């Protein structure tokens, strides 16, 4: 949660190509649990990095699903929504980076303008999907960070969790 809250200000919609996408991805993966996939954004077509990314995103999906059963009621749903939205945004950012790299290659190799390359790969539609994923994560974060939900989560964690479980839950 902290990594997102520190970097959410950088995730604002814009009508321009998101050339800083890889930097934002690096910021959002700058945690002990996600650091192993940070370099995937610079190696989007490398099979080894693709595998690492997909395995970590699958792990995040599993954690989101488990949170619904570990935490009761709205607390579990809020954690689930946040983790699910986070992993979906990371994947959208990864997909968008492939598109940005392709556009840059097109401008160099085929001497297209940036506007022509954007049109050829439907960049605007992909950017809108990226922003939609950012909005979903923002809403999930707002829900999870409400005082009422945080209080319920803390009470449930004190009742059923070991200290390691508590730390692991919020570092992911």
Image (spheres, rainbow, N blue to C red):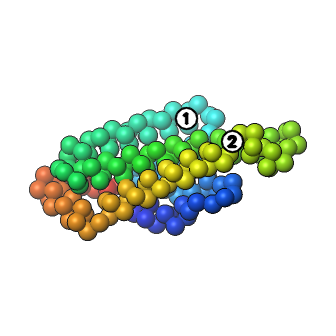
Seen at 71% across and 39% down, the residue is 121
Q: Residue furthest right?
A: 111
Q: Secondary structure at mark 2?
A: loop
- The span from disc 2 to disc 1 (Cα, nearest Å) is 23 Å
Q: Residue furthest left?
A: 159
Discs 2, 1 touching: Cβ within 8 Å = no
Residue 142 sits in which quadrant?
Answer: bottom left
Q: Nearer the viewer, mark 2 or mark 1?
A: 2
- Disc 1 is placed on an element classified as helix
Quarter of the figure with residue 68: top left
How many tags in the picture?
2
Report the quarter where the N terminus lies. bottom left
| Numbered tag placed on residue 152 in the rendering | none
Closest to the observer, 141 or 46:
141
**Neighbourhood count class around disc 1 (C-alpha, 10 Å): few under 14, some 14–19, many 20 upward:** some
Name which residue lies at 85% across and 44% down: 112
For disc 1, the marked residue is: 50
Residue 105 shows in the view? no
Where is residue 116 drawn, in percent x and y? 81, 45
| Residue at image point 61% right, 53% down | 21
The residue at 28%/56% (across/down) is 167
**Rendered image: mark on residue 122:** 2
| Crowdedness near tag 2: few (<14), some (14–19) or many (≥20) residues, C-alpha within 10 Å | few
Q: Earlier in the sequence, mark 2 or mark 1?
A: 1
* 43 left or right, relative to 112: left
Please tell me which residue lies in front, 49 or 1: 1
Where is residue 104, by image quadrant?
top right
The image shows residue 46 at horizontal and vertical percentages of 62, 34
Q: Is residue 156 left or right of residue 96?
A: left
Residue 11 location, x and y as percent?
A: 54, 60
Res. 160 in view:
yes
Residue 113 in the image, given as x and y percentages of width and height: 84, 48
């Amino acid at each position: 949660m902290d990594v997102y809250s520190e970097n959410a200000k950088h995730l604002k919609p814009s009508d321009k190509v998101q050339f800083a996408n890889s930097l934002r991805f690096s910021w959002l993966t700058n945690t002990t649990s996600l650091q192993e996939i940070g370099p995937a954004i610079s190696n989007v077509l490398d099979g080894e990095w693709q595998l690492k990314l997909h395995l970590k995103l699958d792990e995040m999906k599993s954690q989101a699903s488990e949170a619904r059963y570990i935490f009761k009621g709205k607390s579990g749903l809020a954690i689930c929504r946040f983790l699910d939205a986070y992993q979906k945004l990371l994947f959208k950012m990864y997909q968008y980076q492939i598109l940005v790299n392709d556009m840059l290659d097109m401008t160099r190799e085929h001497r297209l303008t940036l506007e022509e390359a954007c049109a050829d790969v439907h960049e605007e539609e992909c950017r809108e999907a990226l922003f939609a994923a950012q909005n979903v994560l923002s809403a999930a974060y707002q829900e999870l960070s409400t005082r009422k939900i945080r209080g319920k989560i803390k009470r449930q964690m004190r009742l059923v969790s070991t200290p390691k479980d508590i730390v692991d839950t919020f570092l992911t």
